């Protein structure tokens, strides 16, 4: 859905439709995005454009968009839970330029490489593309299970975390299998599993991975052999859904239903522990760890000791992963509202709720921002692009602590 055709025509001219294939080359210098979106993201944000995802009806599942758009020059790369492939949109307009073929829908953000992209779909097919989005490997690597998070790049290998509690290393040059580690988990009839493995974290010579039984495991990065394992999650939802975060000699690990702990990297001793867990990717910045909990709260924790700095909790809503831009945290909720929370005091400073044409319009994935543009995907099946306010010359002399325009760049 193109919501700004007049602006598009002004930029590209009448011959734009015949030059689509020329425009999708990511090797070219960005033409429009730099001049349009250059600067810092500042509140308030206004609507830029909206693109409606296709829904061919191939998969009879309820819509849950977990993907995060990725900005690539003049392009936006984004997946769709109801249609196969990765979509290349024009960054200024939301116009669909190209569909990169994949076997299934793509929910993990593509990984930028020096000379292209690494893309994985929800069926576990991994493929490398060049800058013009053409396949590099002779055929995709099939990991054999669903993948919902980005592969982790470690030198010349890509590490994939699959939903069947398996970690796989793939040669980045050839797409061939190198090693794998499968955690055997015995479940009873009443045991529940979320089955959405977080991405692996490489720390030194070890690959640190959380599993659905609540264990965090260190693997040898050269062969996948287990180095040590420690149980973190317990109770009904022990799954570890958030990526492990290294911090000053510790590994911060959070289970879905709690707790969140800091583990000494050398001795595996627990440095600190809090009862709250994390439902998705955590965000660490400066002296704060930002966590969306299973009880619908956004917490700011001190990563050195686990002390709660502040807590923001909307009523009867579940929250997605927080994303920091300047002095704000952007987080979506299950009703479809995007919130901006002041990262210093935990108070809401702005909100946006798009009209999706459906009541089930939650924002479950993380937003992304570059320059003055912010993008996110809603469960109503839309990619939303917002644009921040332009900077004012009169604001430049103000002190950062007293700026009235709530600049997100400070």
Image (tube, rainbow, N blue to C red):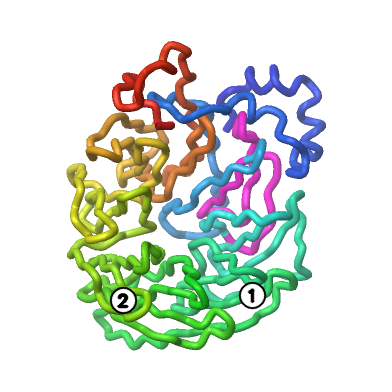
* Residue 49 picture location, percent across and down: 53, 29
Distance from the alpha carbon under mark 2 to that under mark 1: 25 Å
Q: Is residue 115 above or below residue 28?
A: below
Q: Which residues are magenta?
A: 76-104
Magenta stretch holds residue 34: no
Residue 278 occupies quadrant: bottom left
**Secondary structure of the residue carrying numbered label 1:** strand
The residue drawn where x is 47% and y is 59% is 60
The residue drawn where x is 22% and y is 67% is 272
Disc 2 crowd rating (10 Å Cα; few below 14, some 14-19, many 20+) is many
Q: Is residue 85 above or below residue 92?
A: below
Determine which residue is flagged by label 1: 170
Left-right relation of 257 to 45: left
**Secondary structure of the residue carrying numbered label 2:** loop
* Residue 18 picture location, percent across and down: 81, 31
The residue drawn where x is 57% and y is 28% is 37
Left-right relation of 159 to 340: right
The quadrant in which the C terminus is found is: top left
Determine which residue is flagged by label 2: 214
């Amino acid at each position: 859905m193109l919501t700004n055709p007049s602006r598009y025509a002004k930029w590209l001219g009448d011959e734009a439709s015949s030059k689509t294939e020329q425009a999708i080359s990511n090797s070219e210098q960005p033409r429009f995005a730099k001049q349009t979106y250059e600067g810092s993201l500042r509140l308030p944000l206004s609507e830029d454009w909206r693109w409606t995802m296709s829904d061919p009806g191939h998969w009879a599942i309820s819509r849950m968009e977990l993907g995060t758009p990725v900005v690539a020059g003049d392009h936006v790369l984004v997946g769709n839970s109801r249609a196969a492939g990765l979509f290349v949109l024009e960054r200024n307009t939301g116009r669909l330029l190209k569909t990169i073929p994949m076997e299934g829908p793509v929910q993990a953000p593509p990984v930028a490489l020096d000379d292209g992209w690494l893309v994985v779909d929800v069926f576990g097919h991994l493929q490398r593309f060049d800058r013009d989005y053409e396949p590099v490997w002779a055929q995709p690597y099939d990991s054999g299970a669903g993948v919902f998070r980005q592969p982790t790049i470690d030198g010349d290998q890509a590490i994939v975390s699959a939903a069947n509690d398996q970690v796989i290393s793939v040669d980045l040059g050839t797409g061939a299998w190198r090693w794998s580690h499968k955690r055997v988990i015995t479940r009873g009839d009443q045991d529940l599993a979320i089955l959405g493995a977080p991405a692996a974290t490489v720390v030194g010579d070890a690959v640190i991975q959380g599993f659905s039984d609540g264990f965090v495991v260190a693997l040898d990065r050269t062969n996948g052999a287990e180095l040590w394992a420690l149980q973190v999650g317990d109770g009904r939802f022990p799954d570890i859904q958030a990526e492990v975060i290294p911090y000053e000699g510790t590994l911060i690990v959070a289970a879905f239903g709690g707790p969140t702990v800091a583990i000494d990297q050398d001795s595996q001793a627990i440095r600190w522990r809090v009862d709250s867990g994390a439902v998705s990717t955590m965000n660490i910045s400066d002296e704060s760890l930002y966590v969306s909990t299973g009880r619908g709260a956004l917490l700011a924790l001190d990563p050195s000791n686990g002390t709660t700095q502040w807590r923001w909790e909307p009523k009867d809503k579940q929250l997605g992963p927080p994303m920091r831009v300047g002095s704000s945290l952007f987080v979506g909720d299950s009703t479809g509202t995007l919130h901006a929370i002041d990262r210093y005091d935990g108070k809401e400073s702005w909100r946006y709720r798009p009209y999706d044409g459906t009541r089930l319009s939650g924002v479950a994935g993380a937003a992304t921002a570059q320059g003055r543009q912010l993008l996110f995907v809603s469960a109503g099946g839309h990619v939303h692009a917002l644009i921040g306010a332009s900077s004012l010359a009169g604001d430049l002399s103000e002190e950062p602590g007293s700026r009235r325009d709530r600049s997100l760049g400070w």
